[in-house]
Amino acid sequence: GAGVSQSPSNKVTEKGKDVELRCDPISGHTALYWYRQSLGQGLEFLIYFQGNSAPDKSGLPSDRFSAERTGGSVSTLTIQRTQQEDSAVYLCASSFSSGPNEQFFGPGTRLTVL
Amino acid sequence: TQLLEQSPQFLSIQEGENLTVYCNSSSVFSSLQWYRQEPGEGPVLLVTVVTGGEVKKLKRLTFQFGDARKDSSLHITAAQPGDTGLYLCARHGSGNTGKLIFGQGTTLQVKP
C-alpha cells in the first residue's frame, strides 16, 4: 500500500509481558517517528529515526521502552515488562526527510495491558 | 514554556453551526500545524501556517496564525457531521528533527 502501516492493530497483553509493535513506513521516507496517544497525556513524541539511527530518544518514558529500525525501513517498538500505564495507542509516522516536513501517520496499534 | 494549550477540549454542536478552536502558547513558533484525526486512524495534516497574520482557507475551514506567531485558530463555517473528529494543533520541537509537539486536542461532535 502507499501509506504507513502498523501491526498489530490491537494488542491485549498481561502485565509483565513483553510486546513488539511494528511500523512499515512509506517507501523512500528516511525519517520515522513513534508517538503515544493516551487519554490523560494526549499525543506524545517517543523516538525519531533518521535512516537506521535514532538521534532523538528523548520521549521514551523508561528503559523498558526501546526501538530499532532496519534497512532504513521497518521499525519495531518493544516494551518490556509491560505495565498498565503503558496502555495507549502507539502511532508511527514517516516523512521524506527530517525537519519540518509533512508527516504521514499510520492507523496505530491499540495496546491494552491487563 | 513551549506547551500548546487548546480550547475548548470538547465541542458538541448542531449541523450548520459555526465554531472556533483555539491553540495558544506563550512562545513564538516558526510554524504551526493543524491535524484532524478520526477514530481508528492516525492524524492527517490539514494545514501549516508560517507567517504571522497568515490566513489559510480549506473549503469551510479557515486557519489563522496570530500576528505574534504565538497563537492560532481554526474556524469552521456551517459544520457538517463529516467534520466530526479530533482536531490537533502541533509545532515542531527543537533540534530540527521534525518531531511534533501536540496540543491536547479538541473533540468535535457535529449532530445532524
Image (cartoon, coloured by chain):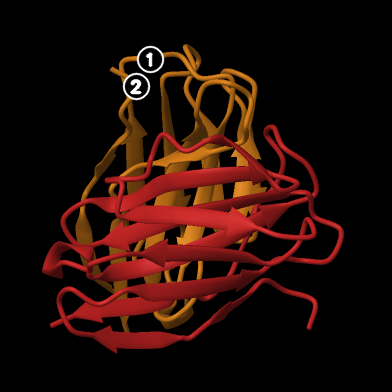
Chain colours: A red, B orange
Query: Looking at the image, which residue is at 54% across and 47% down?
Result: B62
- Residue B14 coordinates in the image, percent (x, y): 28, 76
Dot 1, how many residues are within 10 Å of its Cα: few (below 14), some (14-19), or many (20+)?
Answer: some
Label 1 vs label 2, nearer the camera: 2
Direction right: furthest residue: A28
The percent position of residue B108, horizontal first and vertical second, equals 31, 66
Indicate the secondary structure of the residue bearing disc 2: loop
Camera-side residue of B106 and B66: B106
Label 1 and label 2 in one chain:
yes
Q: Report which quarter residue B76 is drawn in.
A: bottom left
User: Which residue is labeled 2 in the image?
Assistant: B2
Q: Is residue B84 visible?
A: no
Question: What residue do we see at 50% from left, 15% from top?
Answer: B67
Q: Around disc 2, counting alpha carbons within 10 Å, would you say few (fewer than 14), some (14 to 19), or many (20 or more)?
A: some
Decide if residue B52 is in sight here: yes
Gap in angstroms between the C-alphas marked 1 and 2: 6 Å
Note whether B46 is above or below B110 in the view shown.
above
- Residue where numbered disc 1 is placed: B27
Q: Which chain is home to disc 1? A: B
**Which amino acid does the dot numbered 2 rest on?**
Gln
Q: Element type at marker 1?
A: loop
Q: Are marks 1 and 2 in contact (CB under 8 Å)?
A: yes
Which part of the image, by quadrant, shows the N terminus of chain B?
top left
**Residue drawn at 78 percent across, 83 percent down:** A1
Q: Would residue A110 be found to the left or right of residue A8 on screen?
A: left
* Residue at mark 2: chain: B
Q: Is B24 in front, or is B104?
A: B104
Image position, residue B15 (x, y; %):
35, 77
| Image position of B31 with respect to A23: above or below | above
**Amino acid on which disc 1 is placed:** Ser
